[in-house]
Image (spheres, grey):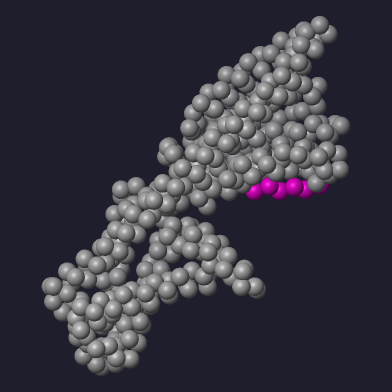
Amino acid sequence: MSIQSLQQDLAYALSRYFHLHKRRDEPAWARLLISSAFGLFFPTFFISLAVVFGRVNVGLSTLLFSYAMGLFIAFSIHCFYRAFERLVPEPTLQRLNRGELKAGVFFAVVPIAIMLLSFWIFIQLARVLTEVEIRNTPFDSTRAIGQFLFISLVFALIGTYLAWQAAKRRSLQLQATEAQLLRMQAQIEPHFLFNSLAAVQSLIDPAPERAKQMLEHFTDYLRASLQTLRAEVCTLEQELQAVQSYLGLMQIRMNERLSFEIEATTEARQAMLLPLLLQPLVENAINHGLESKPDGGHLRISASVADSALTIQVLDNGLGLAAPKHRARHGNGLALKNIRERLAARYDDGAALDLDLTDTGCCATLRLPLEKDLPQP
């Protein structure tokens, strides 16, 4: 492994270190190295203060004892947060990561509490194992405890402020991503609208009944899609209404070569999500999998809720892996990239989009944390 690769792994771990994640895909050694750095930094800081202001002579035994204690405290905090991540539901972790007032109190108070507890445990263990009387600890006097808590609180407040600034930057990044999406959508929509109107016009004389049906689906699609485009968040039911109108329109356009079904539980339909997450997946299934297939095919959309997560699947029996041989997949990767960027900006790693291409079709799976409402950027 190259030095550059190690640096990238360490930078990635550092970017995720101060956030709660149920799934940890960064290298374990990088996280442990960061915790060790904190464990060595704080004893160095406190010893430096003692030497400068207290005129204390520090020997080798004091240094070793202080660094051992710092590592013990750092890894105690590390283990607590990892256990907390694994035990607490994902929506709770996401709320804490957003940096609200309760989250600020949590991240300020918990480290100090664990620090005091692990400090006391370490002192007791050291006294039992070494049989040496340890003095000059923060527990020896009220003044020492006050100084220790004050300095710890200052560091906690600084960390909370930096986390708030990072959350603010992520919010601005999300707004920029959403604005870019709307600009792209504004460029894509006219092409679809003009093509649909042209298809309706071409059917007026030879097949007026089909033209009427297509115009009805077209109107329903416009009504549903415009409602979701104007909202910061929407329900899955609203997304499904727009998608159903779109599929009805495509069904007439493909001369009945397309069949589809939508299955979603009541709880899933009420779930909140970002608009325009589902429709690009459906459009990809039509454009790259089913429309190019001579016999057409079937598309199935399913949505359910389990373990505080919303799972949406878009499954088609189209060309699958053979699609590039029949049609260039221009735009497919861009649509998926935009969805993943929006998911990362809004949910961090609490959401995921997986694409499974086979010889018999494609399955896109979208997983989102279940929330009654989503935070506004």
Q: In x, y percent, where is residue 85?
A: 43, 59
Relative to residue 232, is residue 262 drawn left or right? right
Q: Is residue 309 visible?
A: no
Residue located at (83% from left, 8% from top):
206
**Which percent across, then down, holds residue 154?**
26, 62
* Number of callouts: 0
* Residue 83, image x, y percentages: 42, 64
Q: Nearer the viewer, residue 327 or 310?
A: 327
- 95 or 317: nearer the eye? 95
Taking the spot 30% from the left edge, 48% from the top edge, the residue there is: 101
Residue at (37, 56) in percent of width and height = 162
Residue 67 seen in the current view:
yes
Tell me which segment is drawn in magenta. Answer: 354-359
Verify whether residue 62 appears in magenta: no
Residue 57, compared with residue 359, is above or below; it is: below
Q: Position of residue 142 (x, y in %)?
A: 13, 73
Most common SS among magenta residues: strand
Image quadrant containing the C terminus: top left
Q: As displayed, is residue 67 above or below residue 17?
A: below
Residue 41: quarter of image: bottom left
Residue farthest along the left direction in this orientation? 142
Residue positioned 59% across, 31% down in the render: 183
Q: Locate the N terminus and report the quarter of the image it occupies.
A: bottom right
In the orientation shown, which residue stands out farthest toward the bottom?
131
Examine the rendered structure and indicate whether residue 53 appears above or below residue 187: below
Horizontal side, residue 163 vs residue 337: left or right: left
Q: Is residue 166 left or right of residue 239?
A: left
- In the shown orientation, is residue 41 left or right of residue 312? left
